[in-house]
Structure formats: structure tokens, C-alpha cells
């Protein structure tokens, strides 16, 4: 039995997924530990870079037209390896620019939902993954991986069958010491409800607001479980969708969240020491 369990554990670890131990307490973080999240300004799209103790995760890459922006950002940060690449879902404004990221870095693991798209943007993404000799992995709710001394927990999607592509979004929470960061892709209310019903711990210090601040995301029940101190909205200036909506902004204000927006603040960088978060913006 022990040998069987060892084989299973080794197989899981080879996929980059693990039944990880509890996150570090802030007092137990390694000396000189470093954690930061860069919410990259890619207009009416989404992209974020997470760095922890020299390990890296990119979550979405904006539109295809943002490939050069994302590639340049990675080069500026002197990043040539991405330990994890996450495509939250198959829409171009999330997957498009990941081709640029994969052109200038070597990835170790690439995650995406099972739901794909036939678009050129998604096809290019799949080719870039294949060119690196990798296969796209589909994390399941409850899976987790380590990123340096932080823990990444996958909370969704719970069920992709028959769903709008937005609600197949990978939802994940990164915990570093006593701080945590929730990324929700474009998850809409039906996916939010499923995650709530799963009993997942959503409490987070920072929320990357779902679907660019659309009224179809960030419902009151979902937000009440998160109760973020900070909310980040990745959104384009004067976009045609009316994002973020007044209703979403009102809900975030009711929750007491300090709101940052890429259309107003540009690139948003949040650094954590395990207890407190400092924020800098490019404008």
C-alpha cells in the first residue's frame, strides 16, 4: 500500500499538482522571501504576473494584440522561465497574449479549462504550448500547487458542462503568509454560486474582480465570502461594454474594498510581506 501511495503521489507531482501542506504562517516565511503580483495594463483584457521567491506564474495574457506588451513586460522583469502559465478561459482577451509570453519564456506547466475555442488566438496558444513539448493540463477544483513559499489553490470551475465559456473560468486563490489573492477570470454568477456551494474558503485580501467589473459577476453572496481589502479591475478606458458597471462598483464599495483600475492606474503592483500589502501604480 505504501508503495502504491508513493507511485500515485509521484504521478501527481509530475503534473505539477499536489496535495500541498498548509500555507506558511507569516512568521515561518523564509528569510528574504519575496511575493508580488503585477496586474498588467492590457486595456479591455486581463493579465497578471505573480512572483514568489524566484518562481513565477502568469495568469492570462490579454488580447493577441497585447502579445508584445506582455513579452516586453516579462523581459523588463528579467523573466525567462514561467513555472506556471494559466489561461483562465478560452476567450481571446485572456488567451491571446499568452502566445507572446510563451515566445520569450520557457514554461514548465500550462493550465487551462477543458473547454477550448476554435479561434486563431486559442489555436496559436495551443501551438506555442506544443512547440515547448508540453501538454495543457486541466486542474480540478481542490487541486493545489506550490509557488515558492505561497500556495495556489484551484477553486473552479466545478462543472463546465453546458456552460457559457466565461463560467468555465479557472478560479484560483494564492495564499502567502496571512495575505491572499483571488483570481476569478470572467466567472459569472452561476460559477460563483457553484464555488460557494462547494464550501471553498474564499476569504481574500485582494480580489481580481470578475469579468472586468461586469454586472454579471461579483454578486453580493460571493463578495460577502471574500470581503477583500483591495479590489483590482482590469479594464479598458472608455470601453464599449460600460465596464466596470456602477452596480459592481457600488457592491465593492459596500464591502469596504479599496478599488484600483488599470484604466485609471495603469500597471498595478502589489507586494506582500506576509502580513501587509503595499501598492504602487504606473500612473
Image: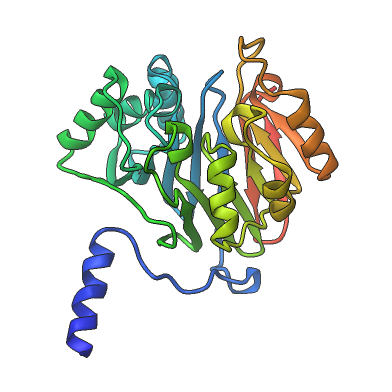
Q: Residue 33, how many percent across, how many down?
A: 55, 60
Query: In the image, what residue occupies the spot 36% across and 66% down?
Result: 18
Please tell me which residue lies in front, 71 or 201. Answer: 201
Up-down relation of residue 282 to residue 159 (above or below)? above
Say if residue 183 shows up in the picture. no
Q: How is the image coloured?
A: rainbow
Please tell me which residue lies in front, 23 or 36. Answer: 23
Up-down relation of residue 227 to residue 244 (above or below)? below
Quadrant position of residue 41: top right
Please tell me which residue lies in front, 214 or 131. Answer: 214
Query: In the image, what residue occupies the spot 21% across and 67% down?
Result: 11
User: Farthest residue toward the bottom?
Assistant: 1
Q: Residue 99, how many percent across, how many down?
A: 31, 26
Up-down relation of residue 106 to residue 263 (above or below)? below
Q: Residue 239, how many percent across, how many down?
A: 62, 12
Up-down relation of residue 166 to residue 29 (above or below)? above
Say if residue 234 shows up in the picture. yes
Query: In the image, what residue occupies the spot 70% across and 55% down?
Result: 225
- Look at the image and tell me in which quarter the N terminus lies: bottom left
Q: In the picture provided, is 114 more to the left or to the right than 230?
A: left
Amino acid at each position: 500500500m505504501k508503495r502504491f501511495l508513493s507511485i500515485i503521489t509521484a504521478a501527481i507531482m509530475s503534473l505539477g499538482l499536489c496535495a500541498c501542506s498548509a500555507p506558511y504562517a507569516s512568521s515561518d516565511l523564509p528569510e528574504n522571501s519575496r511575493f508580488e503580483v503585477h496586474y498588467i495594463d492590457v486595456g479591455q483584457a486581463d493579465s497578471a504576473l505573480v512572483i514568489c521567491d524566484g518562481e513565477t506564474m502568469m495568469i492570462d495574457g490579454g488580447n493577441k494584440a497585447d502579445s508584445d506588451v506582455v513579452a516586453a513586460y516579462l523581459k523588463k522583469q528579467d523573466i525567462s522561465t514561467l513555472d506556471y502559465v494559466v489561461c483562465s478561459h478560452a476567450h481571446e482577451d485572456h488567451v491571446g497574449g499568452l502566445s507572446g509570453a510563451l515566445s520569450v519564456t520557457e514554461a514548465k506547466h500550462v493550465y487551462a479549462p477543458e473547454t477550448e475555442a476554435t479561434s486563431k488566438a486559442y489555436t496559436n496558444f495551443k501551438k506555442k504550448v506544443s512547440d515547448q513539448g508540453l501538454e495543457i493540463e486541466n486542474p480540478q477544483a481542490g487541486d493545489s500547487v506550490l509557488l515558492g513559499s505561497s500556495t495556489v489553490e484551484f477553486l473552479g470551475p466545478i462543472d463546465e458542462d453546458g456552460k457559457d465559456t466565461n463560467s468555465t473560468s479557472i478560479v484560483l486563490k494564492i495564499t502567502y503568509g496571512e495575505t491572499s489573492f483571488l483570481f476569478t477570470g470572467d466567472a459569472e454568477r452561476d460559477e460563483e454560486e457553484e464555488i460557494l456551494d462547494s464550501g471553498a474558503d474564499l476569504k481574500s485580501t485582494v480580489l481580481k474582480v470578475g469579468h472586468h467589473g461586469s454586472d454579471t459577476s461579483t454578486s453580493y453572496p460571493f463578495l460577502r465570502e471574500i470581503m477583500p481589502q483591495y479590489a483590482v479591475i482590469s479594464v479598458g478606458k472608455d470601453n464599449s461594454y460600460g465596464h466596470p458597471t456602477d452596480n459592481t462598483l457600488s457592491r465593492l464599495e459596500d464591502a469596504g474594498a479599496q478599488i484600483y483600475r488599470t484604466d485609471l492606474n495603469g500597471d498595478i503592483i502589489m507586494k506582500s510581506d506576509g502580513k501587509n500589502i503595499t501598492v504602487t501604480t504606473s500612473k
